[in-house]
């Protein structure tokens, strides 16, 4: 019997409410330049501080020591799925985030318009960051002219700015494929290849992408500045066990950005749309409290400012989150976790391998007697250092959802 099967056997149905609140990229590192404090330590957070009085803290490895995760693996681990076993391409996540209903075997690509010179060299990977309206116009043109390639349906959906997604729906397709993106200016668009050259399905999918380029590029060749496009994260929709089946919880997602909605949808969470600020997300949580058992609430701005290397802005984003927190606590869930999907240190200006801090509070969490929620405090907490894929199981345990194992 594997561990997941054991957890399934031990799972009990209760009436508990659980909430996983993710401050994207909240983890950071203390550096000399910032007086050896992190944004969490520098921020004024009276509401988070109050929560720590009845909470356990620790640090989580999103994947494994030394591995820097993308947002996909980071969130799948938080949802309790081994990110190494369940690898999901960025194209699939983007497609789901834009509201496309994918089927098993669909191959999806994250795409964006770019600028090409007369020789087909990429001179601007983002086409001058065209407006969303221009992207929608270009996508409408491509959709009207390229509906099918052979026996395969082609689905195109515009995103924000220069971004869009392409989905290939047909028989005998799979990924992952290499990127049709040189990842820098000054090079031509590379030809897509199957990552596993032995896979007949992947080779078919790679040829489809090449045929799509042959059909689509001439249609926009005279457009400026968006006369080309790049594709990456080309992968198929994998089969993933549904969250509700796995945990016996009715899950809902409150997120603003499409990617995180897509990740939630991937595991079967209901997307609750409309809220645009963290205060509005918490208000929607109150309104939906009786309709769901589990709430995933995502806050992006800690990550955005970390990637910019903007310490003060990241600190302010944490304070803005803290100011809204009392709204959530009007209907405090039986189990509440506040954490990140990974660390985004300002010194790194990107995702990193550093474990992210986690706070868990319930009637059974006990108190680590820590005054604040910070990386330094989390290092001292009773949860210790553990893999993020076990967080959901700890939440279940604190909700008294796991029966005793053995006599």
Image: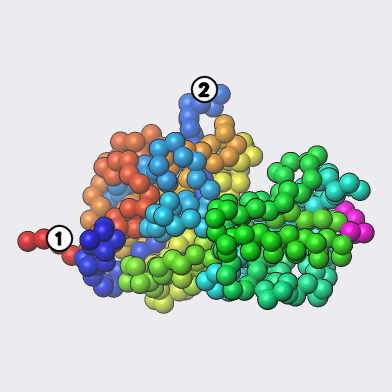
Residue 405: mark in rendering: 1
Tell me, yes or no, whether the highlighted magenta stretch contains residue 223: yes
Residue 96's quadrant in the figure? bottom right
Disc with the residue nearer the chain's start (2 vs 1) = 2
Residue 290: mark in rendering: none
User: Does 230 sit left or right of 29 as displayed?
Assistant: right
Q: Main secondary structure of the magenta part?
A: loop
Residue 131's quadrant in the figure? bottom right
Instruction: Determine the residue located farthest toward the left in the rendered image.
Output: 407
Residue 245 seen by the camera: yes
Residue 290, percent from left and from top = 39, 76
User: Does 326 sit left or right of 395 as displayed?
Assistant: right
Tell me, yes or no, whether the highlighted magenta stretch contains residue 60: no
> What secondary structure is marked by label 1?
loop
Residue 303, percent from left and from top = 56, 46
- Residue on which the image places disc 2: 32
Front in this rendered view, residue 226 or 171: 171
User: Does 103 sit left or right of 125 as displayed?
Assistant: left
Front in this rendered view, residue 325 or 356: 356
Residue at image location 40% in from the left, 42% down from the top = 64
Q: Could you classify mark 1 by the number of other residues whose Cα lies within 10 Å: few (under 14), some (14-19), or many (20 or more)?
A: few
Residue at image location 29% in from the left, 55% down from the top = 394
Provide the residue span drawn in magenta. 221-225
Residue 201, percent from left and from top = 57, 64
Residue 65's quadrant in the figure? top left
Quadrant occupied by the N terminus = bottom left
Front in this rendered view, residue 397 or 104: 104
Residue 334, percent from left and from top = 31, 63
Q: Nearer the viewer, mark 2 or mark 1?
A: 1
> What secondary structure is marked by label 2?
helix
Q: CA distance from mark 2 to mark 1?
A: 48 Å
């Amino acid at each position: 019997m594997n561990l997941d099967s054991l957890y399934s056997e031990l799972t009990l149905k209760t009436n508990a409410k659980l909430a996983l609140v993710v401050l994207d990229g909240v983890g950071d590192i203390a550096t000399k330049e910032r007086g050896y404090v992190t944004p969490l330590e520098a921020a004024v957070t009276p509401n988070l501080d109050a929560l720590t009085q009845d909470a356990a803290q620790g640090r989580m490895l999103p994947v494994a020591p030394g591995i820097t995760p993308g947002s996909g693996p980071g969130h799948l681990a938080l949802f309790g799925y081994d990110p190494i076993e369940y690898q999901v391409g960025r194209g699939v996540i983007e497609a789901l985030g834009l509201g496309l209903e994918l089927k098993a075997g669909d191959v999806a690509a994250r795409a964006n318009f770019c600028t090409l010179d007369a020789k087909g060299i990429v001179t601007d990977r983002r086409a001058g960051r065209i407006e969303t309206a221009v992207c929608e116009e270009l996508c409408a043109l491509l959709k009207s002219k390229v509906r099918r390639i052979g026996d395969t349906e082609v689905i195109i959906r515009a995103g924000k700015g220069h971004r869009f997604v392409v989905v290939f729906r047909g028989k005998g397709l799979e990924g992952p494929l290499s990127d049709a993106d040189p990842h820098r200016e000054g090079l031509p668009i590379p030809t897509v290849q199957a990552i596993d050259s032995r896979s007949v399905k992947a080779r078919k999918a790679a040829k489809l992408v090449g045929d799509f380029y042959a059909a689509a590029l001439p249609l926009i060749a005279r457009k400026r500045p968006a006369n080309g496009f790049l594709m990456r994260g080309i992968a198929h929709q994998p089969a993933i066990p549904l969250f509700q089946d796995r945990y016996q919880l009715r899950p809902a997602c409150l997120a603003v950005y499409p990617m995180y909605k897509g990740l939630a949808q991937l595991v079967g969470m209901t997307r609750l749309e409309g809220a645009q600020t963290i205060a509005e997300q918490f208000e929607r949580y109150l309104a939906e409290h009786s309709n769901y058992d589990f709430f995933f609430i995502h806050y992006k701005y800690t990550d955005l400012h970390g990637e910019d290397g903007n310490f003060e802005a990241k600190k302010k984003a944490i304070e803005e989150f803290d100011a809204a927190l009392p709204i959530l606590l009007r209907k405090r869930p039986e189990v509440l976790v506040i954490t990140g999907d990974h660390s985004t240190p300002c010194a790194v200006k990107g995702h990193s391998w550093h474990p992210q801090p986690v706070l868990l509070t319930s009637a059974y969490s006990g108190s680590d007697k820590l005054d604040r929620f910070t990386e330094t405090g989390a290092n001292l907490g009773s949860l210790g250092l553990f893999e993020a894929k076990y967080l959901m199981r700890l939440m279940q345990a604190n909700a008294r959802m796991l029966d005793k194992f053995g006599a």
